[in-house]
Image (cartoon, rainbow, N blue to C red):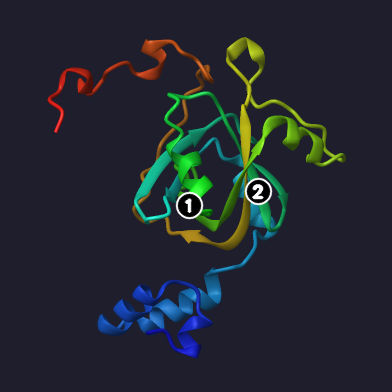
Amino acid sequence: MSTPESAALPGSDGEHQLQEKHNTTSRANAFYRHQVLGYLNPLMQAFVTKQEMMFVGTADRHGEADTSFRAGLAGFIRVLDQKTLVYPEYRGNGVMSSLGNISENPHVGLLFVDFTDQIGLHVNGRARIVEKDEFLRVASASEPFREDIPPATGRGPERWVVVSVLEAYIHCSKHIPHMQKIDEEIQGGTDDVRAKGGDYFKAKTSPRS
C-alpha cells in the first residue's frame, strides 16, 4: 500500500516495495531527486532531436504489453516544447499494435539509446493519436512542417503520436555497446519484402500453437 511519502515519489508502488525489500531505497531516492525530471530540459530536448531511432513501450487496457521500434532521419521526433514531443507513424504491416494499445491506454514509455555517445534517455508520458491533416493544422506556425522522408524514398507519415511528458531520466552508459553508424538509404513505408526482412524467422512455415 502506498503512503503519502511514497506517493510523492516517482515510480510505482512495486518499485518502492522492492527497494525496501532489497535495501536500495536510499540509492533510489537519490536517483529520483537528482535525475528524474517532469519535463525535457534543454539538453534532453537537443538529445531527442538528434536521435534516429527509439523503442516504444505500450500496453492495452488489460496491461498486456508490447514494445516496438521506430526510426527515421535525425529530427523525425519533434520536440514541440519541454512537455510535448511528437513522432510520425508510417505505413507498416497493418497490425497497428502500438497505436491500438495507445487507443485503449495512453500510458507510453519511450527509450532513446545513442550507441555512438553511449547514453540513453527514458521518457514516460501519455500519448494520443493525431491524424496527419489535423497535425498539419496544429503544427507550430513558427517552424515550417517538413516531411521526414522525401517521397522518392518512401511514403510520408500517415499520422502522428503526441506524447505529453511526465518523466524524463537518464539511462546509464555502462552496458550500452559502442557502435559506429554506416550511412545507408532508409526505405520508409516500403512494401518491398526483401527490404522489410522477408520471413527471416521462418514463421510462415512454423507450427501454430
Rendered residue at 17%/17% (across/down): 205
Q: Amino acid at mark 1?
A: Gly
Counting residues from the start of the chain, the first of labels 2 and 1 encountered is 2
Q: Which residue is mark 2?
A: 85
- Left or right position of 102 against 16: right
Is residue 180 or residue 156 the one in the foreground?
Answer: 156
In terms of image quadrants, where is residue 25?
A: bottom left
Is residue 182 or residue 113 the one in the foreground?
Answer: 113
**Are there few (<14), some (14-19), or many (20+) residues within 10 Å of tag 1?**
some
Q: Residue 120 at x, y = what percent?
A: 48, 52
Quarter of the rendering occupied by the C terminus: top left
Q: Residue 50 at x, y = what percent?
A: 61, 40
Q: Secondary structure at mark 2?
A: strand
In terms of image quadrants, where is residue 19?
A: bottom left
Question: Looking at the picture, does residue 186 appear above or below residue 50?
Answer: above
**Cβ atoms under marks 2 and 1 closer than 8 Å:** no
Q: Residue 63 at x, y = what percent?
A: 37, 56
Q: How many marks?
A: 2
Q: Nearer the viewer, mark 2 or mark 1?
A: 2
Q: Which residue is mark 1?
A: 120
Question: Looking at the picture, does residue 156 appear above or below residue 64?
Answer: above
Q: Secondary structure at mark 1?
A: strand
Is residue 187 or residue 95 the one in the foreground?
Answer: 95
Question: Looking at the picture, does residue 175 appear above or below residue 207?
Answer: below
